[in-house]
Image (spheres, rainbow, N blue to C red):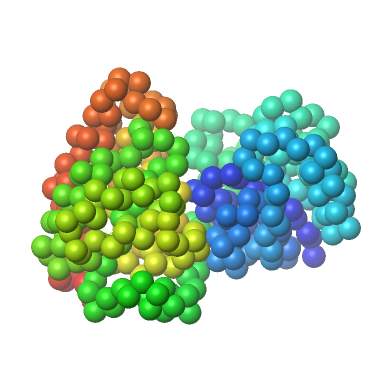
Amino acid sequence: MRKILIVGPSWVGDMVMAQSLFMSLKAGGECEIDVLAPAWSLPVLARMPEVRRGIVMPLGHGRFGLGTRRRLGKELASEGYDQSIVLPGSFKSALVPFFAHIPQRTGFRGEMRYGLINDMRPLDRSLLPMTVQRFVALGQTRETAAAPISFPTPRLHADSANQAALRERFKLDSARPSIAFMPGAEYGPAKQWPPTHYAKLAHLLAARGFQVWVLGSEKDNAVARPIANGNPSVIDLTGKTSLGDAADLIALARVAVCNDSGLMHVAAALDVPLVALFGSSSPEHTPPLARQVVIETLRLSCAPCFERQCPLKHTHCLTGIAPEKVLAALEPFISSSSSS
């Protein structure tokens, strides 16, 4: 059985999309897959049955730490991996597989890392416009990767025991249907639908009998606060859950409303219906990979700019999406005929 070490990405959404690669590798033959990844991602990896284990990368995003990478590589050398697939394009991300003496080290041509990557692949962005396609292509041979890439969609498995514990812990009303809001975006405010818009949508949904769970990290407290203020139907859970907890709660929701963010990809992989709001980014590049999804984007002439902050100082690409428009997009998922 082949043993494969994946050097995983540093963003939540990318880690979810990487599951398509893991699924493709498993479909291609018996193999064991370990993933070298940030500690925060381990709960996500635990919900992927294709992954044997997650291995913590002890260095934070952006830190070089040559000595730490060398020591970790030497520790992993005893595992006898046959191949490593390096998803990030940085020089430092290729060091651990090199120090682990893994014979085949696959990755795209990125920063100068010849020798560290000995199975170097060119990246044709026109052939592989989506991030998920690029990940899956690295798991294929050079010949098969030269054709347009099809891929399985990520599917995370929720933890039912943890779901029950979370309902009890937060005193969540199981008799009242819930809608998950994920108003944050780690990348920057140019990807965030205004909190005032989320707040108005929450009031519209409360009038329809729904409770709203606002999910995200502690960094999202500021955007969650105005959504919850003055609305007893909104439960602000930002900063109160781990990433795994958030995933299990999203899986309980009737539908999710979110920016283009990591939690958007988590919701999609849990097969939860969702309305995704795109501003500075492009749904052609990183779409939610779900069966039931509505994408709201205005496609202004200045978008997508892919900037963290709006270069024009107005963020019209998001402020122009009215709460009433999002409610209309939600209608097929929340109408009484679809509530069973």
On the image, the x and y values in percent for residue 225 come to 28, 50
On the image, the x and y values in percent for residue 85 come to 71, 46
- Residue 324 versus residue 50 in the image, above or below: above
Give the left or right position of residue 321, taking residue 174 as reference. Answer: left
Residue at the image point whose x is 32% and y is 75% from the top: 171
Res. 48 in view: no
- The quadrant the N terminus occupies is bottom right
Q: Could you say which is closer to the camera, residue 278 or residue 23? A: 278
Q: How many marks?
A: 0
- The quadrant the C terminus occupies is bottom left
On the image, the x and y values in percent for residue 271 come to 40, 63
Q: Could you say which is closer to the camera, residue 83 or residue 113? A: 113
Residue at the image point whose x is 36% and y is 49% from the top: 221
Rendered image quadrant of residue 91 = top right
Rendered image quadrant of residue 231 = bottom left
Q: Could you say which is closer to the camera, residue 30 or residue 32? A: 32
- Residue 274 versus residue 7 in the image, above or below: below
Q: Could you say which is closer to the camera, residue 242 or residue 34? A: 242
On the image, the x and y values in percent for residue 102 come to 84, 48
Query: Residue most toward the top?
Result: 312
Residue at the image point whose x is 19% and y is 63% from the top: 232
Rendered image quadrant of residue 208 = bottom left
Res. 95 in view: yes
Give the left or right position of residue 269, taking residue 303 as reference. Answer: right
